[in-house]
Structure formats: C-alpha cells, structure tokens
Amino acid sequence: MSIPTNLTAGTWTLDPSHSEAAWTVRHAGISKVRGTFGDLAATVTVTDADAVVDATIQSASISTGDANRDGHVKGEDFFDVENHPTLTFKSTSLEGDGEDYKLNGELTIKGVSVPVTFDAEFGGVAVDPFGNTRAGVSAETTISRKEFGLTWNAALEAGGVLVSDKVKINLELSFLAPSAN
C-alpha cells in the first residue's frame, strides 16, 4: 500500500461544508430516489504506513427532498433515529496505489455493524485561497439494506417491491490538514 506522499502525518478533519454523503436507491423498480445526510463528521489519522478513518453521521440529518418521505425514513421502519441517532464507519484497512484505494471497515446502521469496502479515489492535496491545506477523496460502495435490518417494504401490484434492497453510497469529502484544525 502507498499512502500519498503529500499527506502529512497527523489527524485530518472533515470539512462538512465542502463534503457530501449521498445515497441512491431504486424506487418501484422504475426510478431512483436520492438523499443526503447533512450532519457528518470524520477524521483520517495518517501515519507513515497507514491511514485510519473514523466517521459519524447524525441519522436525523437525512434529506430526500420530500418532508413526508424524510419523516418515514427517520421513523422505526427505517433508521429509527430516536433509538439510533448515529451511523458510524471505522476503517479496518486501506489498500491502494497512491490514487485508487479499497477502504475496508465496519459500517454501523441502526445498531448493526457490517463489513463494507469503499472504492476510493484520492483527489490530491491543494492549498485553498485562505491558506488551508485540503485533501479530497471520492468514495462509493453498495450495501444491502437487509444486512442492517432495514427490511420495510411494500409489494407492488405488478410484482416486485417498492424499495430495492441495494443502496449505493457516494461520498465527496474534503479534509483539512492537521495544521489547519
């Protein structure tokens, strides 16, 4: 594995105002519904040989663009935000070549932890106009809702179900260097 040489050692902190955690799920077998989480925090602790990711999302910060759907998804049928206020990810290993990576870890949703692998692309390091050193990462994975106990669904008259089992997660992340924190 090769940690990018321009990532300095220390703890890089997510800049949530320049980051996005989004998801897509097939609806009624014919279209896709998208959503985002607005309240996320993460750190990447970089050493000479490794990088460890620790992330938390506030489950109540979900937004699908529809207040009724948001209410349903926040309820017991899906995230049950009153009893499970956070989704977490903790990395277990990182494999890659300096640009493309496999980030392995444990994703916890609704109290259930499942191993997942994100395909990640390191976007590089840059200094912004305000003097902050930033690193960019894009990552994606596909999970099974059922593995996390998110099994609510409704049968369709023509066959199939209302909400697909597979959910695609897309992350666009900007981290601030240790000296900028």
Image (spheres, rainbow, N blue to C red):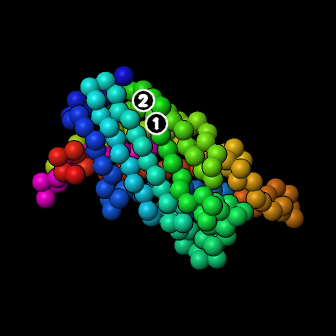
Left or right: residue 180 versus residue 55 is left
Choose between 30 and 106: the one closer to the eye: 106
Q: Examine the rendered structure and indicate whether residue 39 appears above or below residue 169.
A: below
Report if the CB atoms under discs 2 and 1 are less than 8 Å apart: yes
Which numbered disc, 2 or 1, marks the residue closer to the eye? 1
**Amino acid at circle 2:** Leu
Which residue is painted at 21% across and 35% down in the image?
8
Q: Residue at x 40, y 45 (%)?
A: 138
Q: Relative to residue 33, is residue 171 depicted above or below?
A: above
Q: Give 43 or 69, whichever is nearer the viewer.
A: 43
Indicate left or right for 13 with 42 as reference. left
Mark 1 sits on what residue? 91
Q: Position of residue 119 (x, y in %)?
A: 47, 37
Callout 1 secondary element: strand
Q: Give x and y (percent) for residue 162.
A: 75, 61
Residue density around tag 2, few if under 14, some if 14–19, many if 20 or more, within 10 Å: many
Question: Which residue is at the far bottom?
Answer: 67
Q: Which residue is mark 2?
A: 94
**Disc 2, SS:** strand
Q: Determine the CA span between mark 2 and mark 1.
A: 8 Å
Which quadrant would residue 66 be assigned to in this image? bottom right
Q: Judge whether 115 appears above or below 153 on screen.
A: above
Question: What is the span of residues highlighted in magenta in the rendered image?
Answer: 128-140
